Image (cartoon, rainbow, N blue to C red):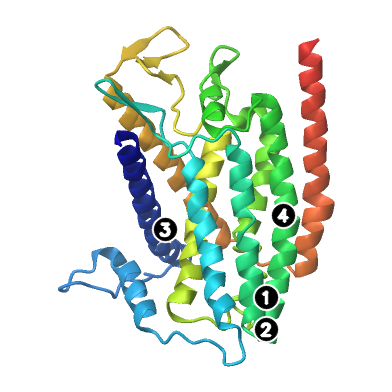
Amino acid sequence: MLETIIILVKVWAVLLTLVSLAAIMTWVERKESAIMQDRLGANRADILGFRVIGLFQPMADGLKMFFKEDFVPPQGNKILHTLAPVLAFFPAMVTFAVIPFGNVLNIGDLAIKLQIADLNIGLLFILAFGGFTSYGVVLAGWSSNSKYAMLGGLRGAAQLISYEVVLGLSLVGLVMVYGTLQLDRMVLAQNELLFGFLPAWGIFLQPLAFLLFFPAAIAESKRIPFDLPEAESEIVGYYTEYSGLRFGLFYFAEFVEIIVISALVSTLFFGGYHIPWLYEEGFAFPWGWTWELPHLVVVILRLAAFFVKIAFFAWLQVLIRWTLPRFRFDQMMRLCWKGLLPLVVLNILVTGLILLLAQN
């Protein structure tokens, strides 16, 4: 009974945090683009005259979508039209279940693992559920019975399937180095030291994998410069015929994906919740200094570090979105199959060769 309560509390806490971060990201998107374009950005929504630099804008967006007409094309498929945004939103939320946001919280004799599900195939779980988003894109385009939406759906299917290959293969090198698909063990391995002082983060062991994984992940989230399936400056887009809360699910899923990608990059390549030289007992610096800390302080510092890393990569994705122009479709596909994919295969071969030589 106690274990069930703990799991439910962790699920509630993670969902609440994820939804809150995604809502804040809608504000960050507006404000960061405004700063880059030398303007104020959204700042009109208020409560009792208080605007708080536009922080009430996500609430205003939610109310607007709730009261807008929920339109379904007369010749469209109503069931699939409704199912499509759910398939785009739900998998992004589920993938966070296997991402560790801390090690263990000890409360008396009770040890609480700061991860919802510690699966031994955690990495495969993320890739499998992440692939479900392509079904939402395709179904949205097809069920709308619109040639513009269908064209966006076809673009999305080609893009997502292509970049999923690069996304999955880019992580093979990490699996070879750490010898596990379990995300928690990967994070623990990254707290070890290389050459006696350098954290064994994935970015140091697999730098090319990071440079391949990050753009492929952005392509999976369908954001500029890979936003061909949406093409918001055109009339082509898989959710062209969506409005109200169904459009809101697509819109919100995009920001949830930003958070999930940031958490994945942090977990796989930047030590996850780890801070360099911080262990269970406190800091132990390579030059001999030590600083003992209470267990609760260590847990809080690690949680804070994890969310700071998420915030940085979420900010970076928004920066890229408002900096780079959109690719042409042929350029996007050429980048995948003739640019990224050969480099991914090369990274696997070089990693295998280095590991083989290290054993000898």
Marks 2,4: beta carbons within 8 A? no
Nearest to the observer: residue 106 or residue 156: 106
Mark 1 vs mark 4: which is more N-terminal?
Answer: 1
Relative to 93, 282 lies left or right? left
Looking at the rendered structure, the kind of residue marked 1 is Gly
Q: Which residue corresponds to mark 3?
A: 22
Disc 3/disc 4 C-alpha distance (Å): 23 Å
**The residue tagged with tag 1: helix, strand or loop?**
helix
Q: Which residue corresponds to mark 1?
A: 152
Marks 1,2: beta carbons within 8 A? yes
Disc 1/disc 3 C-alpha distance (Å): 24 Å
Looking at the rendered structure, the kind of residue marked 3 is Ala
Mark 2 vs mark 4: which is more N-terminal?
Answer: 2
**The residue tagged with tag 2: helix, strand or loop?**
helix
Q: Which residue corresponds to mark 2?
A: 148
Q: Name, please, the residue furthest toward the bottom.
A: 74
Q: Is residue 13 above or below residue 232?
A: above
